[in-house]
Image (spheres, rainbow, N blue to C red):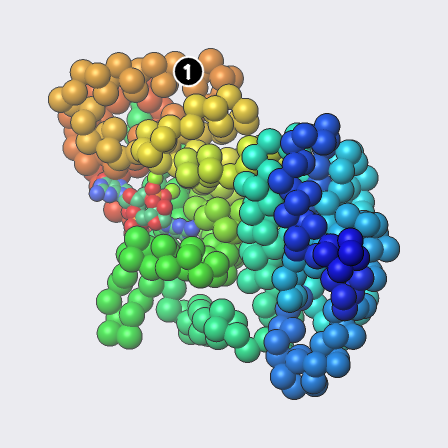
Amino acid sequence: MEQIRWVDNLTGLYNREKYSSLLKDIETKKIRQIGIVDMDINGLRNINATKGYQSGDRILIRIAALIKSVFGVNSFRVGSDEFVSLALNMDKADFEAKVTALKAKFSAETDFRVSVGSLWSDNCRDIYKKVSQANAVMEATKSFGYKNLTADYNHKAESAHRLLAEIAEGRFKVHLQPKINLQTGLIEGAEALVRKIDEQGVIISPDNFIPDYEENGLINYIDIFVLKTVCRMLKDWRDRGGRVFKVSVNVSRVTLIAEDTIKNGVAICKKYGIDPCLIDVEITESFGLLEKELLVDLIKRMHEAGFSISMDDFGTSFSNLELLSQVHFDTVKFDKSLTDSIVDNPKTQILFKAAVSMCREFGDTLTLAEGIENEEQLKVLQKLGCQLGQGYYFARPLPEDEFWERYIKK
Ligand code: C2E
Ligand code: MG
Ligand code: MG
């Protein structure tokens, strides 16, 4: 009876029902550490359609055997082409070594591709959130790995195709806005901001297209394109004898959790001969929604790779003070909404002053005010000790050649 109830007929792994029941009482099981591996076969439907169900079945059986050989009995077939393994009470290094081993086994196969997302934590609280996080990592990896999937003709692949074609046609442009030292008035860096050019040549602002690409999981193509462009620009400026300083890129949540983002970022820098310390990565407060350990680990790894990190739009939504206490940010960028009320609202001034002093005490976290539009705002911000600023008062985001003329050319 147990066999019928808990086991998947085809692969011999446990089924979804067993998985659900294990998750349900995981908190009562005295588990200290948990590793979750979420796996999805790319294009199984297509394989079934073109090669027949028997081929599909053979692949499922093969994958199940590979998973079981690495992660043992706590492996589950949770959907037609989805698998999950749980590693209980396994330390992080062991877990990661196993994930790497499994991925290597998958890559050695020629008949199929499997997208893998994994997550490790030192506790089992909020288990459903952790599980969905591992799934989100897997999804992000899937969109990134698309280039290898010639057989995958689903909707997402089509959109990815279209987006890659648009990028190749030069439909996306990177503009640059200077970051100004508020005490000296000199430029200290820049932020790269993407724009899309529509068929009529009209410039579309990112707020009108980024949310769509975030939703369909393709934003990482844009973020990577922007990073490449920035590296290319930095190399260009250096080659032409111009000034070189730090440029920041905005990185979306989807991009950040995609498995190979840091590795890809480092590889891109290397390709253009740009030291990662010239690249600043702006992440927004909404990252507070991510699993804390995952975010702390990602930021640590980015720092190790040489990138610096800014917290963008600080002071909007739900200010993540906890995040500030967990990881080191090189810069905290105060949202334009705070700058907007800085002149007239004494409470905003008090907030700002406290935040500036908090960042100072963190060590060397810089503070930057976004959206400075007039001199009054600048004066107040200077008085409050804010170090950096961005805004139309200094310059709008500029196309590359204009930025070169105004700020880079010596
Ligand atoms: P953000 O990172 O907070 O960028 C600052 C936004 O404020 C930019 O809008 C900039 O043009 C605008 N801004 C700067 N100074 C002023 C000012 O004085 N007054 C006013 N009214 N606005 C000012 P933009 O370029 O439209 O970008 C909007 C958002 O889109 C960005 O907010 C960022 O979150 C996102 N974004 C832009 N480029 C990328 C990208 O390459 N990847 C990702 N994932 N997101 C991006
Ligand atoms: Mg930004
Ligand atoms: Mg911002």
* Quadrant containing the C terminus in the rendered view: top left
Determine whether 243 is above or below 375 in the image.
below
Q: Which residue is at a point 60% across and 38% down the rendered structure image?
A: 127
Horizontally, is 144 left or right of 85 in the view?
A: left
Is ligand 3 closer than 8 angstroms to the Cβ of mark 1?
A: no
Q: Quadrant of ligand 2?
A: top left
Residue 242, percent from left and from top:
45, 47
Q: For this rendering, which residue is in front, 2 or 199?
A: 2
Residue 384, percent from left and from top:
28, 16
* Amino acid type assigned to the residue bearing label 1 in the image: Met
Q: How many marks?
A: 1
Q: Residue furthest right?
A: 69
Residue 298, percent from left and from top:
60, 39
**Callout 1 secondary element:** helix
Q: Is residue 241 visible in the rendered structure shown here?
A: no
Q: Is residue 29 visible in the rendered structure shown here?
A: yes
Q: Which residue is at a point 26% across and 22% down the rendered structure image?
A: 381
Q: For this rendering, which residue is in front, 288 or 355?
A: 288
Which residue bears the numbered disc 1? 358
Please identify the quarter of the rendering in which residue 31 is found.
top right
Determine whether 209 is above or below 307 in the image.
below
Determine whether 402 is above or below 300 in the image.
below
Please identify the quarter of the rendering in which residue 11 is found.
bottom right
